[in-house]
Amino acid sequence: MHSIDVVLAMLLAVAASGYLIRILPFSLPLPLVQIALGAVVSGVFDAGHELEPELFFLLFLPPLLFLDGWRIPKQGLFRDKAAILELALGLVVFTVIGAGLLIH
């Protein structure tokens, strides 16, 4: 139950950071405000609590990857599609063959 409280507090801090950036009379980078609010959240909850990696991968990583995919320049992506596919497929094949040889 404690993990849910921490996750909700972090989500509230992220939402509050966007609001805080707009109402501050001076300009601050959004990541700095989010780091400061993260420090506040970590100070409120006990220091002995650890956030499970599975929870991080489930809740926080997909929105970050989606946002990066949404903001990528489309012209550059289509221009470099051959190199991207070669690297992606080549790495998968190399990893599968390497892991297979290592395990066998």
Image: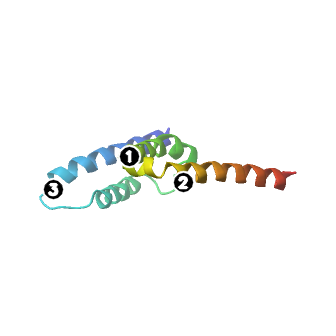
Marks 1/2: CA distance? Answer: 15 Å
Amino acid carrying mark 2 in the image: Ala
**Which of the colour schemes (rainbow, by chain, secondary structure, one colour) is used?**
rainbow
Q: Is residue 15 in view? A: yes
Query: Could you say whether the residue bearing mark 1 is in a helix, strand or loop?
Result: helix
Horizontally, is 21 left or right of 78 in the view?
left
Up the image or down, 8 lies above or below 34; here it is: above
Query: Could you say whether the residue bearing mark 2 is in a helix, strand or loop?
Result: helix
Residue sitting at x 15%, y 56%: 24
Q: Tell me which numbered mark, 1 or 2, is placed earlier along the sequence.
A: 1
The residue identified by callout 3 is 24
The residue identified by callout 1 is 74
Front-most of 66 and 41?
Answer: 66
Query: Which is in the foreground here, disc 3 or disc 1?
Result: 1
Which image quarter: residue 6? top left
Sort mark 3 into few (<14), some (14-19) or many (20+) by Cα contacts within 10 Å: few
Return the residue found at the far right: 104
Q: Position of residue 62 (x, y in %)?
A: 47, 42
Which image quarter: residue 36? bottom left
Horizontally, is 15 left or right of 68 in the view?
left
Q: Tell me which numbered mark, 3 or 1, is placed earlier along the sequence.
A: 3
Residue sitting at x 29%, y 44%: 15
Up the image or down, 41 lies above or below 28; here it is: above
Up the image or down, 31 lies above or below 58; here it is: below
Marks 3/1: CA distance? Answer: 33 Å
The residue identified by callout 2 is 83
Q: Position of residue 100 (x, y in %)?
A: 81, 50
Amino acid carrying mark 3 in the image: Leu
Query: Could you say whether the residue bearing mark 3 is in a helix, strand or loop?
Result: loop
Front-most of 15 and 2?
Answer: 15
Q: Position of residue 69 (x, y in %)?
A: 42, 45
CB atoms of marks 2 and 3 within 8 Å: no
